[in-house]
């Protein structure tokens, strides 16, 4: 991206709310069920069936709005968005048009150059569509003779979060999506799994010559199913538009598809006419006047959100901004950290062992902290053994290797591996005494002021203890005895 | 945004009083509704739809400054259900009713878009 052009990006993020039942009927929302098993007349759009709003979906949307600083609408309604597609059995999607549940708000994102405020236009609630599968011998959609439709997802509550066009680079778009996903996970409104499609994003992107106030022609990009995809697609698309402008072509307002394997965007085959959704108020659903007491209650029940948690970790626990950021970025990791602190209130030690030792080992296994066999209390057990001098740091790392693999208790692993550190003063004293007795010459040298002789004597202590003496303890004891 | 444009279109059409909808406009509307109309039907509905728009145009002339927009004709509000699952188990019946089915899916003609 040359400096002569400015990029403008706005995002639409769809999030499947992790409710038990669907938006307008009681069918389960579980992912991966047998095709067309979680369906009923309502989500199949059969004549005569009537939708009823899932209260929990409203609550989750309002919670999200509160966390984004949106205004919660006193009066909200649902509308019909009309279009024909086989995954939409009613030939309309129940969505929200002019009176969304939440309006306005913002999200702060962190960039290398500091924080940036990204405006939120609106947050509204709608229903998801079914899924289509295109089958052909060649595996290419173009060759498919038929499409197969599964309506299990039809009617799943879908929350749409629309941002202002406030992002100016692919990195900002990626930071926005990462921050938003983190926030939604803290709110426990969705698992935000982009691979499974419970979080999906579309971006509107345009470029314009630097200095120009008029926005360029925007192009909508779809099919980016990871944050990495989003970043790559934005980079590619901005460069493509600049190239088009510089070679005298026009950027066409259109929808393009990100092709992950080829790392390009390609135009989607456009419909003959521009979409004409003919929105109108959903007559089957009475309006929503979300109770103000409930808004206040939800507001008071919001969990500690990532920015506040990070500040607390830095200011109250003394962590570095970097470490606090790593811990807070993952709700489960932050929870694990805080669970450890309840039993072992040494934040820096826990943070170091957690972020570099445990996470490092889990990453090698491709495990997330949530899948770790090492429970918080087991990690604390290990740290307590180190603190008490029963294990050296080096030994503890060896014990942790085994804990990660087997999930065994640290004391058990240490016993099995015969790893321990001699800190018991009675035992240690015998060894120190033996070392002094067996080496009269170095002892005399040390007493004459040769500090190096102490190193030799320490070596003898370690040798006699077969490496298990606690070095700090042994050194202290040696000095005491030799100066006495 | 598209809907706004349509509303605008409707307004323009209704303002041009007594002017019948063009065959192209009827064609567009019937396409959106996936209705196939013969040329006689197009002609017939052009007249009927135009008179509906004329009627709406009369309403548009009323002074509605102090009238709240109507979101719903009923008096109800906040009709909702708790987030509880109830299974229907209609899969087999459904597949029997499907014009075409394959491996538990509905089979439909190939979708051209996307």
Image (tube, coloured by chain):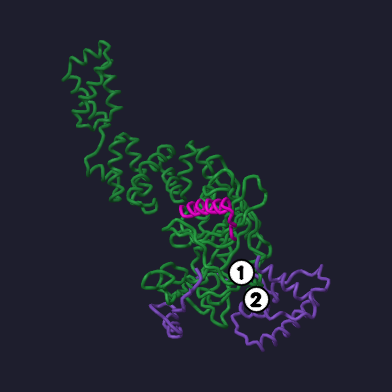
Chain colours: A green, B purple
- The residues colored magenta run A228-252
Q: Is residue B102 left or right of residue A438?
A: right
Q: Nearer the viewer, mark 2 or mark 1?
A: 1
Label 2 with label 1: CB-CB less than 8 Å: no
- The subunit letter for the residue under badge 2 reads A
Q: Quadrant of residue A311?
A: top right
Q: Quadrant of residue B17?
A: bottom right
- The subunit letter for the residue under badge 1 reads A
| Residue A472 sits inside the magenta stretch | no
What predominant SS class does the magenta segment belong to?
Answer: helix
Q: Position of residue B12 (x, y in %)?
A: 75, 72
Secondary structure, mark 1, is loop
| Residue A248 sits inside the magenta stretch | yes
Which residue carries the number 1 mark?
A: A274
Q: Is residue A131 left or right of residue A247?
A: left
Of labels 2 and 1, earlier in sequence is 1
Secondary structure, mark 2, is loop
The mark tally for this picture is 2
Which residue carries the number 2 mark?
A: A283
């Amino acid at each position: 991206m040359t400096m002569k052009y400015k990029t403008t990006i706005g995002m639409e993020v769809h999030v499947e709310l992790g409710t038990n039942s669907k938006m307008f009927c009681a069918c389960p929302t579980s992912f991966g069920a047998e095709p067309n098993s979680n369906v009923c007349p309502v989500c199949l759009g059969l004549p005569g069936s009537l939708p009823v709003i899932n209260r929990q979906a409203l609550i989750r949307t309002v919670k999200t709005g509160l966390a984004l600083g949106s205004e919660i609408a006193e009066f909200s309604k649902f509308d019909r968005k009309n279009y024909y597609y086989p995954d939409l059995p009613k030939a309309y999607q129940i969505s929200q048009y002019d009176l969304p549940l939440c309006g306005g708000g913002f999200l702060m994102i962190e960039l290398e150059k500091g924080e940036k405020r990204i405006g939120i236009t609106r947050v509204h609630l709608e229903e998801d569509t079914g899924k289509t599968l295109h089958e052909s011998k060649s595996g290419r959609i173009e060759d498919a003779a038929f499409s197969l439709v599964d309506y299990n997802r039809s009617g799943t509550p879908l929350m749409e979060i629309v941002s202002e066009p406030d992002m100016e680079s692919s990195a900002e778009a990626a930071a926005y999506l990462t921050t938003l996903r983190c926030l939604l996970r803290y709110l426990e409104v969705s698992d935000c799994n982009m691979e499974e499609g419970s979080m999906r994003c579309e971006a509107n992107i345009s470029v314009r010559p630097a200095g120009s106030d008029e926005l360029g022609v925007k192009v909508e990009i779809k099919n980016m199913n990871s944050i990495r995809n989003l970043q790559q697609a934005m980079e590619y698309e901005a460069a493509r538009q600049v190239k088009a402008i510089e070679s005298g072509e026009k950027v066409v307002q259109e929808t393009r598809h990100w092709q992950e394997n080829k790392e390009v965007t390609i135009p989607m085959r456009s419909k003959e006419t521009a979409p004409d959704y003919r929105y109108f108020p959903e007559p089957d659903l009475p309006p929503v006047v979300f109770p103000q007491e409930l808004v206040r209650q939800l507001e008071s029940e919001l969990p500690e959100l990532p920015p506040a948690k990070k500040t607390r970790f830095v200011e109250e626990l003394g962590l570095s901004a970097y470490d606090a950021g790593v811990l807070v970025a993952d709700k489960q990791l932050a929870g694990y950290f805080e669970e450890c602190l309840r039993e072992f209130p040494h934040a820096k030690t826990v943070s170091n062992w957690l972020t570099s030792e445990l996470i490092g080992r889990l990453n090698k296994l491709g495990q997330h902290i949530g899948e770790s066999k090492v429970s918080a209390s087991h990690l604390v057990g290990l740290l307590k053994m180190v603190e008490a001098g029963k294990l050296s740091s080096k030994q503890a790392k060896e014990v942790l290797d085994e804990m990660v693999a087997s999930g065994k208790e640290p004391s058990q692993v240490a016993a099995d591996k015969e790893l321990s550190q001699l800190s018991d003063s009675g035992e240690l004293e015998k060894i120190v005494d033996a070392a002094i007795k067996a080496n009269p010459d170095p002892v005399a040298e040390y007493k004459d002021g040769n500090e190096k002789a102490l190193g030799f004597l320490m070596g003898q202590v370690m040798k006699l203890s077969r490496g298990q003496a606690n070095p700090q303890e042994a050194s202290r004891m040696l000095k005491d005895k030799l100066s006495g | 945004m598209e809907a706004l444009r349509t509303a605008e279109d409707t307004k323009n059409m209704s303002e041009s009083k007594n002017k019948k909808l063009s065959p192209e406009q009827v064609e567009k509307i019937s396409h959106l509704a996936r209705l196939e109309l013969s040329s006689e039907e197009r002609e017939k509905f052009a007249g009927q739809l135009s008179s509906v728009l004329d009627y709406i145009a009369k309403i548009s002339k009323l002074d509605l400054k102090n009238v709240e927009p109507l979101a719903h004709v009923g008096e109800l509000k906040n009709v909702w259900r708790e987030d509880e699952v109830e299974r229907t188990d209609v899969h087999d019946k459904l597949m029997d009713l499907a014009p075409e089915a394959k491996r538990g899916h509905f089979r439909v003609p190939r979708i051209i878009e996307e």
